[in-house]
Amino acid sequence: MSHSPQPQTDKTERVSKLIARAGVASRRAAEDLISAGRVAVNGHFISEQGTKADPEQDKITVDGTPLKLEDKPPLVVVLHKPKYTITTRDDPEKRATVFDLLPHTYANLHPVGRLDFETSGVLLLSDDGTLTHLLTHPSHGVEKVYEARVRGTVEKGAIEHLERGVRLEDGVTAPCRARVLAQREKNALVEITLREGRNRQVRRMLEEVGHPASSLRRVSFAGVELEGLQSGEHRELLPAEVKQLRRVSELGLKRKSRPRAKPKPHPRPALQAENADAENGVRAPRADAKPHARMSRTNNGRARSARANEGRATARNGDGRTEGARANNGRANSARSNSERANEAENRADEKSPIARRIARKWKS
Ligand code: URA
């Protein structure tokens, strides 16, 4: 940066954002540092909040200490968003927002895409606009997995319709994967895997095929799953997980240059073989998802939500999986029946944590 006005290259970013990215202070606190005259760019103290600098070219100091940006990977948090919270910072209607569930130190994060007010599940928040763009831009086709409880008996035809593409008012949806996880007398649990992210897409698709969703949960975004996070809890992704996120989002770009094929179903050979209902599109639920399908954690050294830790009784091992998860996977293909698996998936579809119940009570009253 030349002192003022600085040349604007496409690499320049607000100094407050760079300070936040370096982990020195939240974005808000960084603005206070600037106002207090404690931040300098190339030796010149700055006071304008909008001042931008090029992190590769300019030397930014806070109280005389240079910012170290290159060592700091983007900060990404996964939140188990409860129903009846809004994916925004401030709501004019004063509804509970996802930021109400996070510590103030995360005030500089922004949501990576959105979940509806009534939808629960995996919501990523990041402090890196480029990563967010990679993960949310439709052309990158990042995979999102949803579980919906729907009314009625879901026939094979409806599943095929969902997979082929559904005509919505904003156009026909791209091919996707869909399957019935559990069919009950009056309702079913359906899993849908999308590479698009249109407004209320899953709800609209299900309505269009005659099975409106009574509840909807995102169970995975770009491979990041809830993995034991109770509703309202969060954790930071490890640097290795963030790297993997970047890889996943960039893969979408490479895929684009090849002809677009219908996404292949996750191979689950043992389950498919034993599942008599497979012909109806009824297969075993995600409770048996193979561990490699998850984005596993490689160590437990990073700070996680205290609340998240309180709720966990399981021990974590060097390979990053919980004892509980290992036990589940060990049993997956043997003792448990499909109906037990279906019950597990259905239980997961309900809001169970105290915070979720509190928010639900508030919005139901
Ligand atoms: N599809 C929906 O209908 N709602 C969401 O929140 C996300 C996807």
Image (spheres, grey):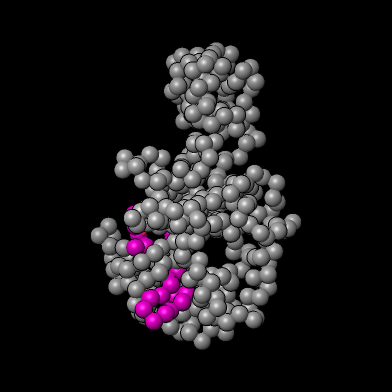
Is residue 82 something one can see in this rendering?
Answer: no
Identity of the residue drawn at 49% across and 18% down: 35
Identity of the residue drawn at 47% across and 61% down: 351
Position above or below: 361 against 104: below
Report which quarter residue 40 is drawn in.
top right
From the top left corner, tell me how far across and down residue 235 is, in percent.
58, 48
Horizontal side of residue 215 vs 102, given as left or right: left
From the top left corner, tell me how far across and down residue 186 is, in percent.
36, 78
Identity of the residue drawn at 34% across and 57% down: 364
User: Is residue 188 shown in magenta?
Assistant: yes
Between 297 and 348, the one lying in front of the other is: 348
Is residue 93 something one can see in this rendering?
Answer: yes
Between 211 and 292, the one lying in front of the other is: 211
Report which quarter residue 270 is drawn in.
bottom right
Identity of the residue drawn at 47% across and 66% down: 349
Q: Quadrant of ligand 1?
A: bottom left
From the top left corner, tell me how far across and down residue 356 is, in percent.
46, 55
Give the magenta-colored segment's residue range. Answer: 180-203
Horizontal side of residue 284 vs 150, given as left or right: right
Between 44 and 275, the one lying in front of the other is: 275
Residue furthest out toward the right: 318
Residue furthest out toward the left: 169
Position above or below: 143 against 59: below
User: Is residue 66 shown in magenta?
Assistant: no
